[in-house]
Each structure stands twice: as structure tokens, then as C-alpha cells.
Image (cartoon, rainbow, N blue to C red):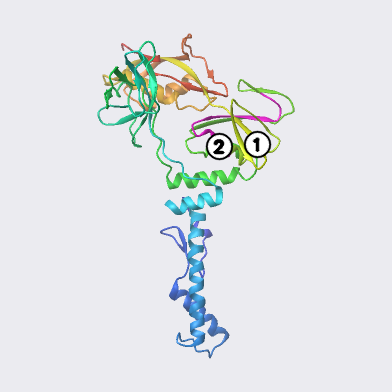
């Protein structure tokens, strides 16, 4: 929460600023009653203001009425200026910005399942590393070769990110399924938005989403629960425009969004869309507004599969599992990049070195999977998201 500069803080007999809690406080019963009694006495010096008198009861009644109003104002003002906490902050964020707290996102893993061809895998099938359980999201069937890759989601929202090949045990054994494993590290879980994160997001949103601008659209879509990445491209000219490897018609925009529900994203665009701007995308959601039906478009990112080659030398004592450490560091960097990002060899090398220690990077090359690796920059298109698997990374330890 942001702090108020004490030089700007003034105090009066009607309110005070608590420097310890960084909140504004208003007078309560005795203080306010004394204020009203003094006010009446200043106008009517000889007035008997004892609570047993009619005028004393009037002052008490006025005081109580104001106390109810003050309690409401105190909660509202502190929530507005200082963000509030918990449920109060949720109410403030919704009433003022129509923003809701982002729920956490559980870790996800792609599980390779092998067994007898055409074996049915029911919904609820689970795998584990012995402690953490991941559950399949929809019924599947092994193909003619007896294998399939399926999406599993962690049962619990915690800090666990399953290493590659650790989810190799079946919780509920099914006849025909012989082996399970996750060839790549599971995705990192995202914790439920904290009070500070929610407050700061509201402040950022309020600064750019005050009108139907393109920034407003991006802000609204980014606030959709489950959205983890977004790229927006706008063509405000009167001619077709090619940018970030994509061609946009005149006066139109494209949104490429990872995560979030399709309908929620469409409604977020609707809530902030500038009139007259065209939309591009392969996902179309129709929204009925009275007798009219409007179509809102956006796209999902396409994966740009990469491969990488890393050569290192022993600097200090290096762990026996150095290959997995280096591979995970590369995966953590590449798979977290924004949609449409620029990938450079120096940035990749620095990220790997910052994540683990005990070695020096002698050489590092990267490129599209199946193509020659090099030191060249990789500029993703505006609708591309970089992805690299542990199996597509080679690590070599050189002598000396």
C-alpha cells in the first residue's frame, strides 16, 4: 500500500492521521459529543446541555446519527486511499474499477501415457510423484501406437513445480495403462492475488482504463482471471499495416491472449471497446445486447518450438545433476517470455547464470526445433509464444 507523505498530512479536531497504521481516523462517541456540546454552548452560552434535558438528548441523537455516517466514511476513505484489506478491498476494487481478485492457477503438466493401444482413460485418472497428485482434465484414449500426451492439473494450489519425469506413479491403476511420466517440468503455479497486488493493479488500471482506448482494452483483458500473457497490436492508420509479422486491416486491432475463459475475454473487450475499431482473430464470441448481436474476436498464441545447445566449464564444485539444472534454467527463461518477444543469446545466457552457479557458460546457441542452431536473434511473430522442452536442450561439460 502506498504511504502518505507526512508533510502533506494535516490534522483537525474532526479527524486525525494515525502514523503507525497509516490510516485516517475520525472522532468517536465522546470526542464527537464534546464537539457538538461545545458548538451548542458557543451559540447558546447559558444552555443546559445535560443529557437528561431535551436539548441534551437532541445533541446525543445528532451525535449518534453522525457516528453511523462517520463509520461508513472511515471505511470507505481508508479503503480508497490505502487499499483496505481482504473482503473490504475486494468490494472497493469491484465498486470502483469492476476488478475482481485473481484466483490462483494450479500447476499443470503434460503427462505421456503408454500402454495397450485404444485403452480408455477416464476422467479423474491421477498420477503422482509420491506426494503431489495431478488429475487428468478429460477422458482420453491411447492411440494406435499405445500412447498419448494429456493435460493434468495439480489437485492443490501450492508452491510445488514437478520436475521432469517425476510424475511417474499411478494413483488409481487402470488395466491397459503401463507407464506414465511428465517429459518436461510442470508449469509454475500462480498464487492467489495478494492485497498489495490487487491494490496496485487497481491503481494501474485506473490510470489507463478511463476511456475506450486500446490501452483500456489491454488492461481489461489482462485483468481476466486466468490470463497469464497478452499481446496487443493496433493499426490506427487508413491502410493495411504489417507489423510483428502480422498484417492488420486499417483501423483494427488484434489481441493474442494466453489463459482465461473465452467468454470472459470477449466481455472484457466489450466493456472497453472503442467504437468503430475492427477486430481480428480466429476465436469469435457473440454477445447479445438487446436485439443486436455483436461479435468479438481474439486469438490464442501459437507455440514456437525451440532447441538449445549449452556448453559449460566447471568453475567450482558442480552438482552431479548439473544437466537438469541447466536445462530447467533454460526452460524457466524461454517459457516465461512474452508473446512476440525478442530472444537474444546474451539475455538467455545471463538468465541461466543468474539461476544457478558453479560453472561458466562457454557457448550457447538457440534456434527453431529441427533447424540449425546459431547465435542469431529470434524475433517471435506477434502471435507466437516461445516453448522449449527439456529433451530439446543439450548440455555439454567441457574440460578445464
In the displayed structure image, the side of residue 292 where residue 72 appears, left or right = left
Write the start and end of the magenta stretch as one range: 248-267
- Classify mark 2: helix, strand or loop: helix
Locate residue 185, reporting x and y percent. 36, 24
- Would you name the residue on which mark 1 appears? 293
In the displayed structure image, the side of residue 386 where residue 239 appears, left or right = right
Using the rendered image of the protein, determine whether residue 203 is visible from the camera's viewpoint: yes
Quadrant position of residue 265: top right
Label 2, label 1: how far apart the Cα atoms are: 20 Å
Quadrant position of residue 320: top left
- Classify mark 1: helix, strand or loop: strand
115 and 348: which is toward the camera: 115
Residue at 55% in and 48% down: 97
Locate residue 298, reporting x and y percent. 59, 29
Residue at 38% in and 11% down: 144
Residue 221 — which label?
Answer: 2
322 and 369: which is toward the camera: 369
Amino acid at each position: 500500500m502506498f504511504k502518505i507523505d507526512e508533510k502533506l498530512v494535516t490534522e483537525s479536531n474532526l479527524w486525525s492521521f494515525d502514523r503507525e497504521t497509516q490510516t485516517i481516523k475520525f472522532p468517536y462517541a465522546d470526542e464527537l459529543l464534546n464537539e457538538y456540546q461545545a458548538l451548542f454552548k458557543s451559540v447558546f452560552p447559558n444552555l443546559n446541555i445535560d443529557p437528561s434535558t431535551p436539548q441534551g438528548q437532541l445533541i446525543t441523537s445528532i451525535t449518534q446519527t453522525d457516528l453511523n455516517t462517520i463509520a461508513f466514511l472511515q471505511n470507505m476513505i481508508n479503503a480508497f486511499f490505502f487499499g483496505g484489506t481482504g473482503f473490504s478491498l475486494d468490494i472497493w476494487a469491484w465498486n470502483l474499477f469492476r476488478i475482481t481478485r485473481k484466483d490462483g492457477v494450479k500447476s499443470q503438466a503434460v503427462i505421456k501415457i503408454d500402454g495397450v493401444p485404444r485403452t480408455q482413460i477416464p476422467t479423474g485418472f491421477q498420477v503422482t510423484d509420491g506426494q503431489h497428485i495431478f488429475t487428468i482434465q478429460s477422458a482420453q484414449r491411447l492411440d494406435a501406437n499405445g500412447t498419448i500426451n494429456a493435460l493434468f492439473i495439480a489437485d492443490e494450489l501450492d508452491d510445488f513445480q514437478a520436475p521432469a519425469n517425476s510424475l511417474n506413479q499411478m494413483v488409481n491403476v487402470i488395466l491397459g495403462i503401463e507407464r506414465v511420466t511428465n517429459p518436461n517440468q510442470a508449469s509454475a503455479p500462480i498464487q492467489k492475488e495478494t492485497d498489495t497486488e490487487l491494490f496496485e493493479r487497481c491503481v494501474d488500471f485506473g490510470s489507463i482504463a478511463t476511456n475506450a482506448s486500446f490501452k483500456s482494452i489491454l488492461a481489461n483483458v489482462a485483468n481476466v482471471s486466468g490470463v497469464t500473457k497478452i499481446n496487443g497490436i493496433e493499426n490506427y492508420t487508413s491502410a493495411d499495416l504489417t507489423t510483428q509479422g502480422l498484417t492488420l486491416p486499417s483501423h483494427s486491432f488484434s489481441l493474442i491472449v494466453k489463459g482465461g475463459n473465452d467468454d470472459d475475454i470477449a466481455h472484457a473487450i466489450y466493456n472497453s471497446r472503442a467504437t468503430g475499431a475492427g477486430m481480428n482473430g480466429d476465436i469469435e464470441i457473440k454477445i447479445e445486447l438487446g436485439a443486436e448481436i455483436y461479435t468479438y474476436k481474439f486469438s490464442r498464441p501459437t507455440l514456437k518450438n525451440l532447441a538449445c545447445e549449452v556448453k559449460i566449464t566447471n568453475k567450482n564444485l558442480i552438482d552431479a545433476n548439473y544437466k537438469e539444472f541447466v536445462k530447467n534454467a533454460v526452460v524457466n527463461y524461454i517459457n516465461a517470455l512474452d508473446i512476440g518477444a525478442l530472444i537474444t543469446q546474451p539475455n538467455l545466457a545471463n538468465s541461466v547464470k543468474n539461476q544457478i552457479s558453479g560453472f561458466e557458460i562457454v557457448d550457447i546457441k538457440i534456434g527453431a526445433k529441427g533447424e540449425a542452431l546459431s547465435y542469431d536473434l529470434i524475433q517471435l511473430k506477434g502471435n507466437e509464444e516461445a516453448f522449449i522442452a527439456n529433451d530439446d536442450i543439450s548440455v555439454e561439460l567441457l574440460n578445464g
